[in-house]
Amino acid sequence: MCAFMKTNDYNLLLANMPVAYALHEMLYNGNGKAYDYKFIDVNNYFEKITGVSVKDVVGKTCMQLFPETEQYWIDTFEKCIIEKSTVELENYSASLNGYYKVTAFSPMPGYFITMTHDVTSECKKQKELALNEQRYRLSQEVGKTGSWEYYIAEDRYWNSPEFRRIFGIDSNDEDINGVVEQCIIDKSIVNNALVRLIEENAEYNIEFEIKRYNDGAIRVLNSRARIVYDSIVQSKVVFGYLVDITEIKQNESNLKQSKAVLSSILKHSRFSIWSIGSNRELVFQNELFRHNFHQLNGFYPKVGMRLTDFIPGDIKELWERLYFRVLKGESFVEELDISTEKNQNIIEVSATAIYVDAKVVGASFYAKDITDEKKMLEKIARSESEANDAFQKFDTIFRNNSALMMLTDISTLCFIDVNNAFLKVTGYDRADVVGKTPWELNLVHAEDRYLFKKVGKIIEEKSIVEDMEIRLLKKDGGVITCVFSGQYIHAKEQKFGLSVMIDVTERKFYEELQKNNTVNLRKIVEFSSIFMKTFLEDAEFDAITDMVREISGVKHVVFNTLTDTCSEIKSVSSDHFSVDELNTFLNIDILKKKWPRMAKADKKWIHQKSTLFENISELSAFGVPIVVLNELLLKHNLQKFILLRVEGTKKVVGNFMLFYTKEDKVVNTEMLEIFSYQVGQYIERYNTEIELRNKMNEMERFYKLTVDREHKMISLKMEINELLNQLGKPARYKIVG
């Protein structure tokens, strides 16, 4: 042992080096077989990775300290002593619950030294990377999205298995670039776009045709790409995705022929879409843009408005600049930070000029909230490992997809994972879902459970299910209608089902609404033909109110007529209360009371065909007593109302009030606006006729007074002439007739 006594320099070096050092004495049984070993000396780092202090290690055997040590460790070290060789191994230690890389050698017979590295973290990262790569590959297969990368400095391409499937290439060789180029029909489209992306950082969003390698089929592809800096290879890399859009292109002609369908898609898109004219006036908007504009400015925009007149001052200059660029013919994609004191929001705006005969006549904008996406990209940029990068790619596709996505165990139908869209739409938390079956969650509508029970078997047998309509129950009991697609995946001896569901509840609602609008329009025409004959004589205001209830489906409707100074309630239609009940409650006759008009209230609704008031308390601005508002709110659960303008040719002559409970869905007012316009014309004619009748009565009275006066003057003149005649004098007046 004296030969191995260390100097002070060696002691200092061994004690502080970042590797677990240990000197051991091998212990043998009576048969000369190694069964254990004793710790002679260890350094400080040994204590760090084992958790056992140095003073408690020296002099103790391995089995005393770590009784779960596997025999292969002792056998390996014995071999090192016998063969006088250096041994390197990496393995799992149950006693330390980790992975370790050990270098061992024998300095003298019966003794050996180990240098140990804790590689647990690296091993776990490798396993996680493999799992994430599997998830990423599965998501591409189900989403039918191929990815590709171009390493600029190396002039090298990488592409995913789904990319090769789209091109019909079965080869697994790394270099298939030549085969890919052979498949592209017009190579200039792809090459020019890639050059512009690299040299000018121009938008890479192209469509091109290919002739698939395996079957010669002509397919249309869409590819998008952007340049990022890869910290691993320390150079710029083009990351791209492509999708087979052949079927989409084939259906475009049908979509163009159906203006109603296209309008519905744009109107109810999950993204803000709007268009402006050459003077920056609004020419088109979808519902999400209207909502977002209202959230920012406090009112809903109308077609024809000049948007920049209403944009808040702190972002007005920004939007002026963007509008100016695109109206000059520039198309671009821009990320905007529109953060407020309460929220941080980043939106991606795509702007495209609208041309007619090579002249810019307007611009279209497409905006989406990419706040979460940006946060994810920032997280990827901070990541230094390939495993984390792979996980973020999968998370972008799976977790943040706008469609509802689920990963299930085919054998048990238990949820393995669900994405954020699923949680948002259904109202569940992830902890509520993972590990549960759809039956435990009561997720599937009772009438559709037989469909979902067959899904697992169908997916396993056919590998894929497409476009199956199914109804789901949200956590709060609400019903949503989805189009279900799923695919069977077999990986690592486990069966998975990756499912995608598109929420079509709103679309089906508006399809039904369109049907109802057609029926309501027919009712309006039929009503008008009868109403024109009777209203001007009978003033059947109740018939008007009943018609509004029938069209809208609203349970409570009030009809008012307006003068310059006041309003009069002409009719109340409700399934909960009557006019007599209201009269008794208020101790007045509401149909005879003149309600004063207030300028503040008129200002909010008088210039809009229909105005939604979110709070029933706003009726106070129309002179309605607080006690009535409390009655409507507490007893009848009325939360909000719509004021629908009734206008004649020259002015507003009345309005309809449609009252809603908290649970009621606010109706589309398009049909109601048509009907209210007709009513306005009838009322104006009615008022005109009443005015004409009054004038004729006044003229008749004046004529009668005039004739009576003339008759009296003639009689007086005749009496004077008679008196003069009796006096022997000539008549003074000449009587004619």
Image: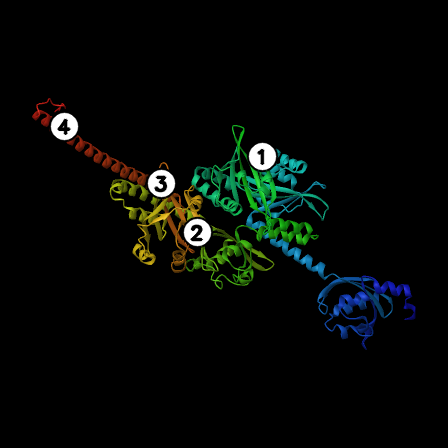
Marks 1, 4: nearer the viewer: 4
Whichever of labels 2 and 4 marks the residue nearer the N terminus, that label is: 2
Tell me which label, 4 or 3, sits earlier in the chain. 3
Task: Determine which residue is flagged by label 1.
Answer: 324
Q: Residue 681 occupies which quadrant of the picture?
A: top left
Amino acid type shown at disc 2: Glu
For mark 2, what is the residue? 618
| Mark number displayed over residue 110 | none
Find residue 717 and name its label.
Answer: 4
- Asked which secondary structure carries label 3, the reply is helix
Dot placed on the residue nearer the N-terminal end, 2 or 1: 1
Left or right side of 138 for 154: right
Cα separation, mark 4 vs mark 3, equals 61 Å
- Which label sits in the foreground, 4 or 3? 4
Mark 3 or 1, nearer chain start = 1
Categorize mark 3 by other alpha carbons within 10 Å: few (<14), some (14-19), many (20+). Answer: some
